[in-house]
Amino acid sequence: MAELITYREAVAEGIARELRRDPSVVCIGEDIGAGEGVFKTTAGLFAEFGPTRIWDTPISEQAIVGAAMGAAMTGVRPIAEIMFSDFLACCWDFIANEMPKVRYMTGGQVSVPMVVRTANGGGLGFGAQHSQAVENWALTVPGLIVVAPSTPSDVIGLMASAVRSDDPVIFFEHKALFATKGEPAPAGHVVPLGKANVCREGTDITLVGLAWSMPIILEAAELLAAEGISAEVIDLRCLVPLDAACVLESVAKTSRIIIVEENPFQGGWGGTLASIVADEGFHDLDAPVKRLAGASVPAPFAKHLEDQVLPSVGATVDLARRLVGG
Amino acid sequence: MTNSTKEELASWYDQMLVIRGTEKAAYDLFMTGLVKGTTHLASGHEAVAVGASAALKPEDYVWATYRGHHHAMARGLSPEACLAELMSKETGACRGKGGSMHLTSAANNMMGSYAIIGSHIPMAVGSAWSAVLRKTDQVSIAFFGDGATNIGAFHEAINLAAVWKLPVIFICENNLYMEYTPISAVTAVQHPAADRAAAYSLPRIVIDGNDVLVVRDEVAKAVALARAGGGPSVIECLTYRHYGHSRADPAKYRPEGELEEWMMRDPLKVLRARLVESGVSEDEITGIENAVDAVVKEAIERAKDAPLSDISEAFTDVWADGGMQWRN
C-alpha cells in the first residue's frame, strides 16, 4: 500500500498537479509563496513554480479576488486563496455580486473560470472570527460552484475538477481536517463536481455529511453497527451541484435521514437538503427529516465551549437510535 | 499637444455625436416608457471615452461603471445594440439580461459595466495581470467616477497594480458629484483620484476631461508607459454630467448657473471649434452632424422594432453549459 498523505499535503499536491498540467493556471494570495501558506497548504509550490506562477499579495481580499476575476475573464485560470473563510466577508462583493453574475448579466459573453480556496470551519480554537463554517454563505448565491472535500484524495480529485471548471468555484478546505491522513490519489485523479460519495452502505438510516462532519458520521455509523443499526453514509462533497438524487435514492432504501452539518442551523445548508427530501422523498419517509447543525451562536474560542455548539458523534448516535427505534 | 489630423478630429466628432445622440434617445425612450428600470446617462463625458479609446489598440481591455454607455460605444458597441439592451430586446448587447448598467461588448474587449461602485477596478488590475502572464502588450483601463475613490477596492487595486507594475490605467471621470452630494463635501482631498496617487508612488495627473485631444494625449502617454513595463497611471479627468445622477434625479442640488457654465465647455463645442480651427468647413461639419442624426434615428427605429428577448433567456447563462441546473 502506498504511503498515506495528509489532507494538508493533498491541497498542495492538487494545486501542483494543475499547475503542471496547464500553464494558464496561477496562484494568488497572502503568504502563499515563499511563506508556503499559513496552513502550509501551498508547501513546495513556490520552489517548483516560482514567482511567475505563485503570486504573493498584500492583505487586500478585494484586490485578490477582483484581480483573479479580471484575469479569469481574459484567458487565465487563477486559484485565489482567501486565508480564512471568515474573510470571504471582506470580498463578499466579488463572491456574491461579481463572479457568479457576470456570465448571466452579459448574456453569456464572458466566463469566469476561477477557484477561490479558503480554510473553513472550527476545531482549532481560533474564536468567532477565524472558526466559522460558512459554506452556507456560498450556497445562497446562484452561480457559484461550492466544493468541500473531506479526504486527501477527494481534495486532489475535486481540485482538478474545480480548476478545470469554466464556472467560478468556492473551494472550502477544512482547518480541522488538515492533519488527517488518507490514501494518496492516483495520477490523473479527477472527481467530478456534484457527485456524492456513498462511503458506507446501509439499510436502516441515511447519514449525510460534508467535510468536517464526515469523520463524525462515519464514527457514528460504526457505533450504530455494533448495536445492529445499519447506517448508510453519504459524503455530499459539493453543495453545488447538489447530488440530491443520491440522497433521495438512499432515503428510498432506508426511510430515515439525519443531515449533519457544521454551519449554524439558522440558514445552514441542511435546510435546503431537508426541504428537498421532505418534498420529493415524502412517501419514502418513516420518520421526520432531522438536522444536526452548529448552534446558532458565534463560534466560541474555548474547546469545551466549542464542543457544546457543534454536532457530535454521541448526538448523532442518540438521534439515530431514536429514529430507528421509534 | 500633439498634432491630430483633420480625419482624426472628424472621426472623434462623429463618435462623440453618436454617443450624445444615443444618450438623448435613451432619455426620450425612458420618458415614453420604452426603457424601464434606470439609466445613468453620460452626456458631457464623451471626450473621456472617445479620447481614451483613441489611444488604445482594439485588443486592449476597458472596464466601466453603470454609467458606461459611452465607453461601450467608444469601443465599438453599436447604438442599436445599446438602445435595444435598454429596451430589453433580443438584439440588445446582453439580450436583456444586463440592461443599462451592465452593457458589455466582449468582442471588443469591453469587459463590462459594473453597478457596485469600484468593483471593476480590481478586475482591470486582473486583466492587466493577465496580459503580463500571457506575455502580450495589452493595456487595461478602468473608468470610474469620483465617488469610487472613497471605496476600499479603489485603494486595494491601485496599490496592487503599483506594487506589481501592471499595465493598467485608472481614469477618474470627476463630474463633481457622487450621486447627489458634491464630492468635495465628502472627500479629504481636492482631487479625489489624483491627490491619492501619491500614496501609491504615482504622479498627480489632472486634466481637462472635456477636451478629447487633451484626453487622447494624456492617455497615450500612460499607455506608452504601461506597454513599456513602466506600470500604472492614475488620470483624473475634470468633466460634468449634463443630466442628473440617474433617471430619478432632476439634479436640483446643483447651484444656479453651474450647468450653463459647463455647457459653455461642452466637449462637443470644444471639438467643433477645433474642427473649424483645423480648416474643416462648416458644410463638412454639418454633413457629419446630419449623418450621425440619421444613424441614431435608424438605431432607435431598429431597436424599437426588434422583438423582446425570449422568455427562456431568464433561465440560461447561469453556468458554462448555458443552463441553470444546480442539482440533479
Image (cartoon, coloured by chain):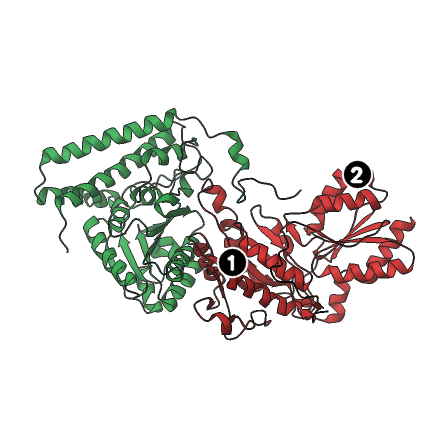
Chain colours: A red, B green
First in residue order: circle 2 vs circle 1: 1
Q: In the image, what residue occupies the spot 68% across and 66% down?
A: A177
The residue at the point 67 percent across, 70 percent down is A5
Residue B187 location, x and y as percent? 36, 59
Taking the spot 83% from the left edge, 58% from the top edge, the residue there is A221
How busy is the neighbourhood of tag 1: few (under 14 within 10 Å), some, or many (20 plus)?
many
Image side of residue A28 versus residue B46, left or right = right
Q: Locate residue B122: give its quadrant.
A: bottom left
- Using the image as rendered, state which of residue A31 and residue A269 is in the foreground: A31
Task: State the image quarter where residue B205 is shown.
Answer: bottom left
In the figure, is residue A305 to the left or right of A127?
A: right
Q: Where, by quadrant of the figure, is residue B133 drawn?
A: bottom left
Residue A227 in the image: above or below residue A59:
above
Q: How many marks?
A: 2
Q: Is the residue marked by circle 2 packed among few (<14), some (14-19), or many (20+) residues within 10 Å?
A: some
Q: Give percent across and percent down for residue A203.
A: 85, 49
Mark 1 residue element: helix
Q: Position of residue A311 (x, y in %)?
A: 77, 60
* Chain letter of the residue beneath label 2 in the structure image: A
Say what amino acid the circle numbered 2 marks: Phe
Query: Which chain letter goes with mark 1?
Result: A
Q: Is residue A320 visible?
A: yes
Residue designated by label 2: A282
Tag 1 residue: A91
Q: Are marks 2 and 1 in contact (CB under 8 Å)?
A: no
Q: Nearer the viewer, residue A12 or B224?
A: A12
Query: Which quadrant is the N terminus of chain A positioned in?
Result: bottom right
Secondary structure under the numbered disc 2 in the rendered image: helix
Image coordinates of residue A132 in percent, x first then y, are 65, 62
**Amino acid at dot 1:** Cys
